Image (cartoon, rainbow, N blue to C red):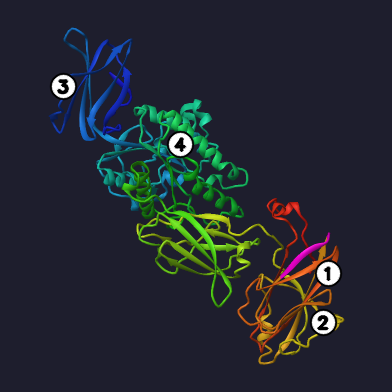
Amino acid sequence: MNIGTGLFNSMVLQRNRRNVSEGVFSGTCDCTGSVVVSVTKRGKKVSGYSSRPVGNASRGRFAGCIEGLPAGGPYEIELTINDGKGGAADRMTVRDVLVGDVWILGGQSNMQGCGRREDRLPPNPMVRAFYMNDCWATALDPIHNLWDAVDQIHTDLNGGIRHSDDHLLGVGPGVAFGQHMYALTGVPQGLLACGHGGTSMGQWDPKLKKLGGKSLYGATVRRFIRNGSKIAGVVWYQGCSDANQAAAPLYTKRMKELISAFRRDTHDARLPIAVVQISRVVGWGDDVKYWNSVQDQERLLSSRVQNCTVVPAIDLALDDGIHISGKDQQRLGRRLADAMHVLREGRSAGMPPIALGKVSIEEERGRGCGNIVVEFANVVGGLRAGSRPAGFSLVDRNGMSFVYDIALDGKRAVVRSSFGFKDVGELSLHYGHGVNPYCNITDAADRPLPVFGPLHIGKPRALTPFVQVLRVSAFQPGAGRLHKLECPDDLAPLNMLTRTFSQIFCDLHDEISKTAPKDLVVFYACRILCSEDMGIEAHMGYDGPIKAWFDRREVFHDPNGTNPAIAGAARVPIAANQGEHELIVALGTNESKAWGIFLNFERKDLPLSVLRQGPSSYAMPRILG
């Protein structure tokens, strides 16, 4: 007798809903007859399993099903083919078999495991792995032993050269996942190691299944079939290789196709899937938005795919520029197990991963600033951070963030910015913006907030970027609160020079500080070009007395301007005809307490239906400087 599928030494058989085995096996033989089984556990016969008929052998093959073994073990299973004359035509024994839950581990390098091997967990004999050499053994990292892989795809992806074992790395989340699942359920766990570093969703395409062991999905299905064609679920970590312009827009579609294929090929329409939201990377390059796009698509999978849970990893430490450290792979494995346990057992087993809830804007009393209040669901024991909370960003069109404080309040995070209440809605909200953010907010159960964004928190608006190129005058004699200051007839005598400011705050602090304690005036000038008649607003923020003229006509005056400067504190309505116009702004230095101004423009005469179509559907003032 030669076993081909479903029954091997040291394996884990998948239990059914009745918590017992339903293990289908098959193989080749040289005889014909009935297949019977006898089972012992720790040397004692298992009731009902003494020469119990379980299958048949004919035409060189045998097959059967071992039903009813309770979850647990280990079991010693003796298979005999009876010749029909009261004799044994053939016999074999399979030893150290467990009954419990079996999981496919798939994805790329962080699932394969690149954490330092010195941080691996000690083995637990109730947690087994089906290594890549098609052998079962107690799970001890590295379980993805690519250097010994049976399936050709793992060599092909390495340029046709078999992988080598570097003896230093190899810790992934799988072993910790299995051990924590064992702690949660009390039943043995089996891990089918199927990941491969650097692989993309295109390389995991289920359409390549027909290639068998020469494709990633085909190799995974082969390993699944070899172990009896029954599993408890899939654990997945992948997406880094799809964080680019070509692949990122297709990520959700490809993940849906992959999950559908797993469910079709496992004959389980509700097969549980636990997905890791990719963490962070150092030195990725310019494709920041695509990395964040993949993360946000992964976050939303749980709402778009039934029986799918997503586990964040953004707060975890790295062992190099992209791979989660061996120690924090253990944290990730436990998080995955907790999430999978809730997915299978419901709320009685705990809380699902933290999810983004309601987002609102509050005006901060006394300052006029707009604070973003972010509420989260599924928080255990309140949000917390080991130090000053970090990770939120309010980002403008130039990618600049304006968050100066984050306060945690139970299930809420209050994100405080330097933007006015009326203007903060023009920004986009992120958690984990960029490829290498610092995020440290979790709940009491060590579950982090998910990466999300860009999240547009206000209604669509037609806004120009902040003006950062202006003509700036030399300092002029002081004029107090600017009540009597008139618009200059000619700017030439003011020695206007074009200045490019490195930030959106047009900051003259260094120059103004040198004039202390004098009270002076500085003029800013900006020309705009309107391709058609427009109803616009000039948005200004300032920290000293201010007066503004549009085409030499006074349009705004605040004699009590003081610090801090808040972007958009003043909104000045202007009717601008087609053609070129000039805005002149005078700022009193307020005895050196003033630093500068914010300035941008908004078009206000557009209906909401046009705004929703986006900037390509309408004209905007062109900033000439």
Q: Residues within 10 Å of mark 3 (few under 14, many from 20)?
A: some
**In which image quadrant can residue 149 be found?**
top left
Q: Residue at x 77, y 60 (%)?
A: 620
Magenta: main secondary structure equals strand
| Helix, strand or loop at mark 4 | loop
Q: Which residue is mark 1?
A: 581
How far separated are the C-alphas under marks 3 and 4? 45 Å
> From mark 1 to mark 4, how far is it between C-alphas?
69 Å
Mark 3: amino acid: Ser
Using the image, determine if residue 352 lies above or below residue 1.
below
Residue bounds of the magenta highlight: 531-538
Name the mark nearer the viewer: 4 or 2.
2
Which quadrant is the C terminus positioned in?
Answer: bottom right
Q: Which residue, given by chain and number where applicable, does mark 3 sit on?
A: 50
Of pointers 3 and 1, the one earlier in the residue sequence: 3
Kindly identify which residue carries mark 4. 162
Name the mark on residue 487.
2
Query: Which callout, 2 or 3, points to the residue nearer the camera?
Result: 2
The image shows residue 438, relative to residue 225, as above or below, that is below
Label 1 element class: strand
Q: Position of residue 63 (x, y in %)?
A: 31, 18
| Residue 38 as seen in the image, left or right of residue 250 | left
Neighbours of disc 4 within 10 Å: few (<14), some (14-19), many (20+): some
